[in-house]
Image (tube, rainbow, N blue to C red):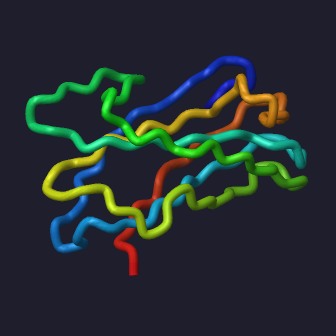
């Protein structure tokens, strides 16, 4: 549940199976509670997690790759699950878990959806 006026984020760690290699495709899954075609701006950052790093809730390592903000229009149908792809066939490196940070960039003028937006999750899959 990401607020429309406050910058919020969620941080998670994914352990990419070694047999996948280093290249993955990532989708963000989200929805809005009300019907509107206004836009929500999402951003997904990532970083390799070394064995010596600790990650606090709501933070991402300073070595993170900053994702490009996605300005995505909602739909006129309320509670419709949406899938969008911030990364296609992207190499995330080798041998370590990956830290992801998902944020709604509420301060971006392109984010015009006035209500909360719901982040459902990330889908991470081996690129083909």
Q: Residue furthest top?
A: 6
Q: Residue at x 84, y 34 (%)?
A: 112
Percent across and percent down for residue 128 are: 39, 81
Percent across and percent down for residue 96 are: 17, 50
Q: Residue at x 18, y 58 (%)?
A: 94
Answer left or right for 33 relative to 22: right
- The answer to whether residue 95 is above or below residue 25 is above
Q: Residue furthest bottom?
A: 128
Q: Residue at x 66, y 47 (%)?
A: 70
Q: Nearer the viewer, residue 124 or 64?
A: 64
- The answer to whether residue 75 is above or below residue 3 is below
Q: Nearer the viewer, residue 65 or 86?
A: 65
| Res 99 quadrant in image | top left
Answer left or right for 63 relative to 40: left
Q: Nearer the viewer, residue 59 or 91?
A: 91
Answer left or right for 1 relative to 93: right
The N terminus: image quadrant: top right
- The answer to whether residue 27 is above or below residue 105 is below
Percent across and percent down for residue 16 are: 25, 59
Q: Residue at x 63, y 42 (%)?
A: 69
Percent across and percent down for residue 33 are: 77, 41
Q: Nearer the viewer, residue 26 or 110?
A: 110
| Res 8 quadrant in image | top right
Tally of numbered discs? 0
């Amino acid at each position: 549940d990401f607020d429309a006026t406050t910058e919020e984020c969620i941080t998670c760690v994914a352990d990419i199976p070694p047999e996948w290699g280093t290249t993955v495709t990532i989708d963000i899954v989200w929805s809005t509670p009300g019907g509107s075609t206004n836009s929500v701006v999402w951003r997904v950052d990532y970083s390799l997690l070394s064995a010596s790093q600790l990650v606090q809730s709501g933070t991402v390592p300073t070595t993170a790759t900053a994702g490009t903000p996605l300005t995505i229009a909602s739909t006129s149908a309320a509670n419709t699950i949406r899938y969008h792809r911030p990364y296609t066939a992207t190499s995330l490196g080798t041998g370590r878990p990956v830290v992801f940070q998902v944020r709604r960039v509420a301060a971006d003028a392109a984010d015009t959806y006035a209500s909360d937006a719901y982040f459902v999750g990330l889908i991470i899959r081996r690129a083909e």
